[in-house]
Amino acid sequence: MNAFFAVLFVIFFYIICYPFAKNLQLCGYDTKFYFVHMFKLPYDFSGKTNLVWTKRMIRLAIVYLLVLLAITLPYFILIFNFWWIALGVIIEFLLLPFIFVFTALVMHPCEAAIKKFYIKKACKVLQEFKGIKIAITGSFGKTSTKNFLAAFLKQKYKVCATPQNFNTPMGLCRTALECLKVDDEVLIIEMGARHEGDIAELMQMSQPRYGILTAIGEQHLQSFGSLEKIKKTKFELCEHMPKGGKVVFDYASEPTRELFEKFRGEKYLVGQKEGCCYIKDAKYSRRGSSFKLVIDGEEYKAKTKILGSALLSDIATAAYMAHLLGVDVKKIVETISGLSPTPHRLQLIENPFCTVIDDSYNCNLLGARQACECLKLFKGKKIVVSPGLVEQGDKQYEFNFKLGKVIACCCDEFIIMNETNKTALTKGALAGGMKKQNLHYAYSRKEQNQILKSLQEKSSVVLFENDLPDNFK
């Protein structure tokens, strides 16, 4: 009978640890980060994101179940005093977060070995690939630049690009082993980083001869610690570029220009008149943008449904790389007219009642300013929904105060989501001239929808600026 109750409690303990597993996954399986912030993370079974049952999570779940059984069964079977068993249950319940972290730590050597196996297998495929390999990194604009470049290069080549925002070693492994085909001629690799050495590892795996450095800024400051470390990490793309390799720099930010000056290899600057490619006479409307694309001194008129100056800069960067690789400029210009925004990056969604600008993937101040400028292009009541910016380290309050001021200048109503940046955003918005009655607070998706429903009018415009994952309150 005791064994039966032991199994029931194991099942109960197992189920209630679902939020721990989801938070660990949202933290990128970074056990150290998870342990430090364990009690700051929300304990929530719902939310907009569900636990993804990857192979890694399934392995962790199985081992965790075995650990729970190993802890619970002995005191249920060997102890016959009810109160001692009850005390054991209470202690185990209180220790569940630590038991889960312990299990994740136990799994580290196994996961490291599995990662090493797949990296070795993927490296072999990448070495055998004889086509053109292009690496893209930066603080923001990587995915949009990758998608634009893929569209341009498809006018001449058979192209494979890392899917969605797969930008880690395991993401590159999946691309090489599952997506790359024998007859592909170009492989575009998006490279992300949270720590020094991350880009170097990806460069060593893929060994590309072409590279793009997009805008660099104070992103992931919490893990990097400083802008200097961010620049140093992004410059790893240049340091590991082979002799004869070519790098295109997007002058959308001053740090990128600094790295352009530092690099001694073959390089091209995009975004300034003294550069080899830039955008000229750009005009914006709610229907998109029109501009002149200048490549090597020649001007080409172009139109696109894409909104925002930063995204036009991404287009110019991708266009010049495609030009370097022999794609006819006229075909590039034709392709620009058919480009669509990357999902959740200033994506325009029209419906009969209102217009939605989905910029929920953005998580930097530069991009937020651009989104607010786009919002000003529209008529009607303007509403912004935002939880602010995260992972900004010591500058989190400062950046969110600035964001609040920026938002106050472009909208009529501001819905602040979650607790994380509530104070900074509120004070920033008030400093920017917004009235208290136009500030609203929502702590769940349901509350947000209710407030939106009460505020919306016919032909109103709603900007969703950033969207925090479920592991932020």
Image (tube, rainbow, N blue to C red):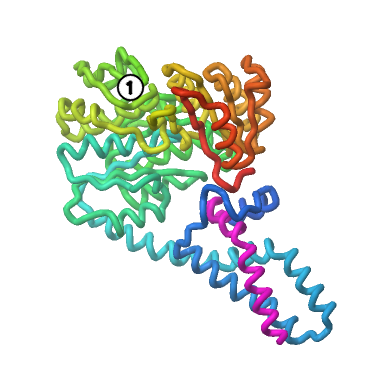
Magenta span main SS: helix
Residue at 63 percent across and 53 percent down: it is 44
The image quadrant that residue 252 belongs to is top left
* Quadrant location, the C terminus: top right
Assign the N terminus to one quadrant of the image: bottom right
Residue at figure coordinates x 65%, y 53% from the top left: 43
Please tell me whether mark 1 sits on a helix, a strand or a loop. loop
Residue located farthest toward the top when viewing the structure as drawn:
281
Q: Which residue is mark 1?
A: 287
Amino acid, disc 1:
Arg
Range of magenta residues: 1-30
- Closest to the observer, 6 or 355: 355
At 52% from the left and 18% from the top, the residue drawn is: 410
Q: Is residue 421 visible to us here? A: yes
Q: How busy is the neighbourhood of tag 1: few (under 14 within 10 Å), some, or many (20 plus)? A: few
For image coordinates 38% across by 62% down, the residue present is 118
Q: Position of residue 189 (x, y in %)?
A: 33, 45
Left or right position of 444 against 209: right
Asked whether the viewer can see residue 254, the reply is: no
Residue 208: x and y in percent read 29, 45
Which sits in the foreground, 49 or 174? 49
- Residue 31 lies in magenta, yes or no? no
Query: Is residue 57 shown above or below 271?
Result: below
Of 106 and 448, nearer the camera is: 448
| Apparent side of residue 116 relative to residue 194 in the rendered image (left or right) | left
Residue 200 placement (x, y as % from top left): 42, 46
